[in-house]
């Protein structure tokens, strides 16, 4: 496929002008990326399939799932996914549509992997909030919405499954506005639902797109459209729904502010769509509108140079990017490790040399770059802002690392972790496997699959404790240690503790509180970097300690030093 075509001449011209690594403006302008946030079962996989279909990236709907099945067949640890019926791994899916390069950052749906999703959202420029129209907002959507809000991401709302009996569109609109304080601006408006679903009104063009039942698998049939004022419309959708639609349109005109790109990009307004991923209705209308309303490759703030607020734009004439995800042994036959890099500025080229932020000027040769499409790896020779590339990682990249060209040192801020809520001692009963155990655990910790704490002890050698957001993460770690490193481990729950807080004030403050007898019933641990982490049994106890001992400076997580 030809996403890199045509830019070689532009690159040569830029090089001649002295900006070897500048990204051509046209490549920046045509890129859009997004991640889908949703509660499991809202239809993320189905929507992804349909989107890829429009990009011509797959030949038939269902291919995402069957590719996933192939992948499961080649990779043993993904047995776990199959057993549990959940998706653990996330990949980046790229496709071209109407001249645009679209990158869909896939995110796992299960809440125990929300940390993975969180890191992926750090690389995204837009979020698509997928809502089951029969259920409205669900817990996982709420949690992920909060993350998008923190990041100030533009949010597009797609209410799915209109082919089934749904809440009224006004109910959905009110619920999201009320709960999130997000101004909803319907772009599409549904006509009926369930068996009476007749289509959607495009409020911009005043065209009604009529829904035809049938073809589930392929591209939506060339569907009929009628003007809102067409005398045929009441006949096509029925008198009752027509009158309802007229009434709705009037209410919306009085109620809804016009769409404002600046507000959309600031995450204050959310363009709202209705449709059905399964029957592929409303999906292409959404995709087209997303291309014009979605935010292009966004600037990122940088933490170096003494000016914390500085934004680095995609036009910055050097290559920069940051690592937001690591994955090992994706293909067990190759024992590979991949680092996923989000390109922020400039042009990536296979074989280029870059500086590494954490290694103080040391340069790294980026020989092997890959773009992932499920299990098929396509070698990438060029990439631009908004793209994600997978680099073979012989241990040099960690989550949060920045790579860059040029003399100026650049470092993007690290990606914070979620506060863990589950804790368990991990034991390796077989000393002969110690080396493999260490290697495997280190690898999985680097990936951010779990965090490792240690019990505080006098000799500094306390027992290791796994800390995770959900217990499923423990299962994955144990499974992978066995499957990939041949090490059988035992977990021993640390019962009763469900909240962790880092003390920014350090050990002296913790010791002082301890000496005053104020840390009774609180478990003292330290993180990988030796910093104090306190584990609490409940929210009430935590609140009490926070109120009594502000000097501990308790925070839900601490970025790597
Ligand atoms: P995910 O967990 O969010 O990835 O959800 P899936 O895409 O796997 O969909 C969950 C279930 O909802 C599946 O049985 C889908 O066939 C079904 N589904 C998805 N989209 C629609 C839709 O638009 N209409 C209907 N009726 N079912 C849908």
Image: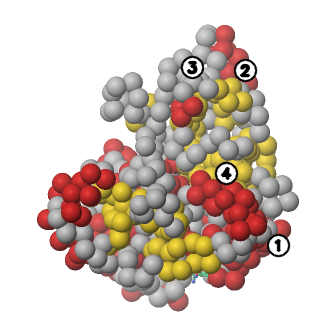
Residues 292 and 459: in front is: 459
| Mark 2 close to ligand 1, CB under 8 Å | no
Dot 1: what SS? Answer: helix
Alpha carbon separation for disc pair 4 and 2: 23 Å
Residues 120 and 540: in front is: 540
Residue, disc 4: 94
Percent position (x, y) of residue 555? 30, 57
Does the image show residue 31?
Answer: no
Query: Marks 3 and 2: which is nearer the front?
Result: 3
Quadrant location, ligand no. 1? bottom right
Residues 405 and 125: in front is: 405
- Quarter of the rendering containing residue 287: bottom right
Residue 276 falls left or right of residue 61:
left
Marker disc for residue 73: 1
Residue, disc 3: 406
Mark 2 or 1 closer to N-term? 2
Percent position (x, y) of residue 467? 48, 68
The structure residue drawn at horizontal position 77% and vertical position 52%, both measured from the top left corner, is 336
């Amino acid at each position: 496929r030809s996403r890199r075509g045509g830019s070689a001449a532009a690159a040569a011209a830029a090089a001649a002008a002295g900006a070897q690594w500048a990204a051509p403006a046209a490549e920046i302008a045509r890129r859009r990326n997004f991640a889908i946030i949703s509660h499991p079962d809202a239809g993320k996989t189905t929507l992804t399939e349909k989107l890829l279909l429009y990009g011509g990236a797959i030949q038939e709907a269902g291919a995402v799932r069957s590719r996933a099945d192939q992948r499961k067949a080649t990779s043993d640890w993904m047995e776990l996914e199959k057993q549990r019926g959940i998706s653990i791994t996330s990949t980046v899916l790229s496709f071209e549509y109407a001249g645009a390069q679209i990158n869909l950052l896939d995110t796992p749906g299960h809440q125990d992997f929300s940390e993975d999703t969180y890191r992926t959202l750090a690389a995204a420029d837009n979020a698509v909030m997928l809502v089951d129209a029969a259920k409205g907002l669900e817990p996982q959507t709420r949690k992920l919405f909060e993350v998008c809000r923190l990041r100030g991401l533009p949010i597009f709302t797609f209410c799915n499954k209109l082919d089934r009996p749904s809440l009224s569109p006004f109910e959905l609109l009110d619920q999201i506005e009320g709960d999130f304080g997000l101004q909803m601006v319907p772009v599409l408006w549904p006509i009926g639902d369930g068996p009476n679903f007749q289509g959607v009104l495009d409020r911009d063009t005043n065209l009604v797109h009529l829904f035809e039942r049938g073809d589930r698998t392929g591209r939506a049939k060339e569907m009929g459209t009628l003007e809102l004022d067409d005398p045929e419309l009441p006949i096509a959708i029925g008198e009752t729904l027509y009158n309802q639609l007229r009434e709705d349109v009037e209410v919306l005109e009085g109620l809804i502010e016009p769409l404002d790109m600046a507000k959309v990009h600031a995450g204050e307004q959310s363009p709202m769509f209705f449709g059905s991923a399964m029957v592929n209705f409303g999906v292409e209308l959404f995709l087209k509108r997303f291309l014009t309303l979605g935010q292009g490759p966004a600037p990122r703030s940088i933490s170096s140079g003494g000016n914390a607020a500085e934004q680095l734009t995609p036009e910055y004439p050097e290559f920069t990017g940051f690592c937001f995800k690591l994955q090992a042994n994706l293909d067990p036959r190759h024992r590979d490790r991949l680092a996923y890099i989000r390109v922020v500025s400039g042009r990536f080229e296979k074989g280029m040399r870059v500086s590494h932020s954490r290694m103080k000027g040391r340069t790294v040769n980026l020989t092997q770059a890959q773009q992932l499409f499920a299990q098929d790896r396509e070698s990438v020779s060029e990439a631009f802002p908004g793209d994600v590339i997978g680099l073979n990682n012989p241990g040099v990249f960690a989550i949060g690392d920045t790579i860059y060209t040029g003399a100026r040192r650049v470092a993007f801020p690290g990606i914070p972790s979620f506060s863990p809520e589950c804790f368990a001692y991990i034991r390796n009963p077989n000393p002969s496997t110690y080396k493999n155990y260490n290697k495997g655990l280190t690898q999985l910790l680097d990936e951010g699959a779990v965090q490792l704490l240690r019990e505080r002890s006098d000799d500094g050698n306390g027992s290791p404790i796994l800390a995770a957001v959900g217990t499923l993460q423990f299962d994955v770690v144990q499974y992978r240690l066995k499957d990939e490193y041949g090490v059988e481990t035992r977990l021993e729950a640390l019962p009763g503790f469900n909240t962790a807080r880092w003390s920014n004030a350090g050990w002296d403050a913790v010791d002082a509180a301890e000496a005053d007898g104020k840390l009774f019933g609180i478990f003292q641990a330290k993180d990988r970097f030796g910093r104090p982490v306190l584990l609490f049994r409940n929210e009430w106890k935590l609140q009490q300690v926070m109120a009594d001992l502000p000097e501990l400076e308790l925070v839900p997580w601490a970025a790597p030093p």
